[in-house]
Image (tube, rainbow, N blue to C red):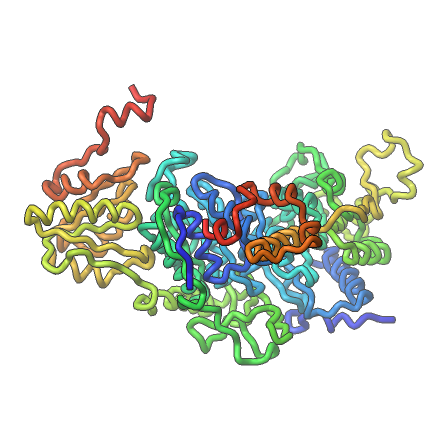
Amino acid sequence: MGRIAFLNANAAVAEAALVAGLGFYAGYPITPSSEVPERLSKIMPEKGLPFMMMEDEIASINACVGASASGVKAMTCTSGPGFSLKQEALGMACMFEVPLVVVDVMRGGPSTGLPTRPSQQDIMQARWGTHGDHPIIAVAPCNAQEAVFETIRAFNLAEKFRQPVVLLTDGSLSHLHTKIYIPDPDEVEIVDRAQPEVDPENYYPYDYNYEVPPLAKWWTEDGKSYRYHLSSLIHDKTGFPTVYPKYAQWLLERMHNKILNHRDEILKYEYYKMDDAETCIVAFGSTAEAARVAIDQAREEGIKVGMFRPLTIWPSPEEQIRDIASKVKQFIVAEMNLGQYKLEVERIVGGRAPVYGVSQAAGVLIRPSQIYDKIKDPSKRVEIGLTEEELKRFGGGE
Amino acid sequence: MAVDYTKYLRMDKMPLYWCPGCGDGIVLKCYLEAIDELGWSKDDCAMVSGIGCAARVTGYVDFHTLHTIHGRAIAVAVGIKMSHPDKHVFVFGGDGDLVHIGGNHLLHACRRNVDVTVVLINNWIYGMTGGQHSCTTPPGAKATTAPRGSFEPTIDVCKMAIGAGAGYVARGFAGDPTRLKKLIKEGLEYKGFSLIDVFSPCPINFGRRNKLGDPAKLLEHMKSFLVSSAKAKRMSEEELKGKFITGVLHKDTEKPELTEAYKSIVEKAQASDEYWAKYVKGTLSESDKNKITREELKKLYPYDVETPLKQWKKL
């Protein structure tokens, strides 16, 4: 039996990570994500698990890669600027194919930007932040309860596909306290990385016979020791570097295929009042909650509008959006940035329907009224949804 | 007794990738001799390296090995050591890798005194990328990015490590392998962070541009910068200027090791957990009360310490 708690999404992520089997945490303080390490620093020693605050963002993700490669479930947590610093090592985790969960509590950017304000500006950074062709999984919960389940799912996907997974929340969601349920580990599905059936002598970390080769723990519970080499260079099945063009091509294609061929297991999405919808709103994270209110309001007036909410942002739900494109008259992508996911939706829709955007990067949540206005007249630009009185509270300006 | 090096090496990866006259092979040999003398099983050893010539060591030693990204090897090693405190964790790397781009991680590993042994192969140059000057290139020495000679001052890595709080700091020389082996062995045995800064020749990318292409000549040149710790004691500060002292420079047997320090935090956290469990059941004995004082608990939990376990655990 789990327990009920009154937590914000940051604390919820920390609790859920422990349910999922977190074995090592390394981080660096950054607003608005700091409650995650704060909570873990209290609980992890009680469970005898290592918790580290490292010297910088780079060191924290590198320590996580080291821990994960040796056989422990690892997580790190950060926000925009820190996520930028972590990118190189995120690429290493992709290349090593080690499971890893990176929580990015999105704040306003670029650079130091709006440290205490919410945004969804790291959508493309999550996809293409690190250099080179690489696969990525990114998930975005829309409330604290979902953050619990998505965190557990992020760990499971990471372990199953030997793949770093990015969990995207935002500055608002992460500080909104709600009543949530934290399940016990036996109530939810917990996936542990597949272990090799062969002896250490016959083990290859990138065995060609598998789409996702088992990643042996260095020191197994039954006293075996799997000694092998992982390299951040392009490697063959043994893990040692190679420049053989065929191997390089194979490796990158397999790395992508292990994700793209299993979209059915990785993708998660929600259709909200989409059955007869003529307008489809695409929204995720806390913006989706505003869209839900706007849709309900418009429906009362008889406007046929619904929402498609991807929980898995990357890989994108191409088939689903393409299917919707053949049924609806128009798309509205609502997001707290200047249209990053809108680009992806436009690419998938491919001109079959017009794609409009509620693209707000003002460091404030998108309000239901803004989305409602857009539903009424998609061609009209939506202004920041704050009254004069509310704007005064922020100070500054003219 | 001769050491069977093949026991510790991945022989199918031979021949070594290093240039003729390179010191890396000498350092690796000394290191393997030290491991052999200690009798450590290679199953218990993990090695991490970053990018560079010296970082290629992880491909040759038959341990649990990670060849990671430039400059971050020590951070990765800290992650492994914290997850597996009972295993031996090592880092091999060059001056560009560990001191220049990765200096911050070196500094803080020293401060933490985490039980990782770092063998730093200091060849005064970025060898792999073609001989660009680094933070250890002597002023005036030529490099591909310093055709008129380097104009930057260098860093004394050992002094920096001692200042940062490393438990064991030594400097060795690839031209003196017998002594180097002893220094590495002492570093491996030391429970805490150990740094062995090894002056090692790069005749191809450092030597050739400085009229020192002959490895023997380069070794002699490097040696002219070195002073043994015994000799240094008799020298004045003025005489020691620009010199680097070899031998064990610092050994602190008092400083707690990081995983040990964390273990005591874990014990404290778990003991107080136990305390609360008994508190709720009402089975707290007098001896238990003495185990952790109320004041200590207040320090551990800045909450209302009288609130029973069941309530605060759910918060």
Q: Is residue A122 visible?
A: no
Q: Residue at x 82, y 66 (%)?
A: B37
Place of residue B36 in the rendered image (x, y in percent of width and height, measured from the top left): 79, 67
Q: Residue at x 52, y 50 (%)?
A: B308
Q: Is residue B227 left or right of residue A335?
A: right
Q: Residue at x 27, y 49 (%)?
A: A341
In the rendered image, the vertical position of residue B168 relative to residue A386, given as above or below: below
Q: Is residue A118 visible?
A: yes
Place of residue A245 in the rendered image (x, y in percent of width and height, measured from the top left): 46, 66
A349 or B29, which lies in front? Answer: A349
Place of residue A30 in the rendered image (x, y in percent of width and height, measured from the top left): 48, 40
Residue that sits furthest to the top in the current view: A398
A322 or A390, which lies in front? Answer: A390
Q: Is residue A219 left or right of residue A357?
A: right
Q: Is residue A297 left or right of residue B237?
A: left
Q: For the C terminus of chain A, which image quadrant?
A: top left
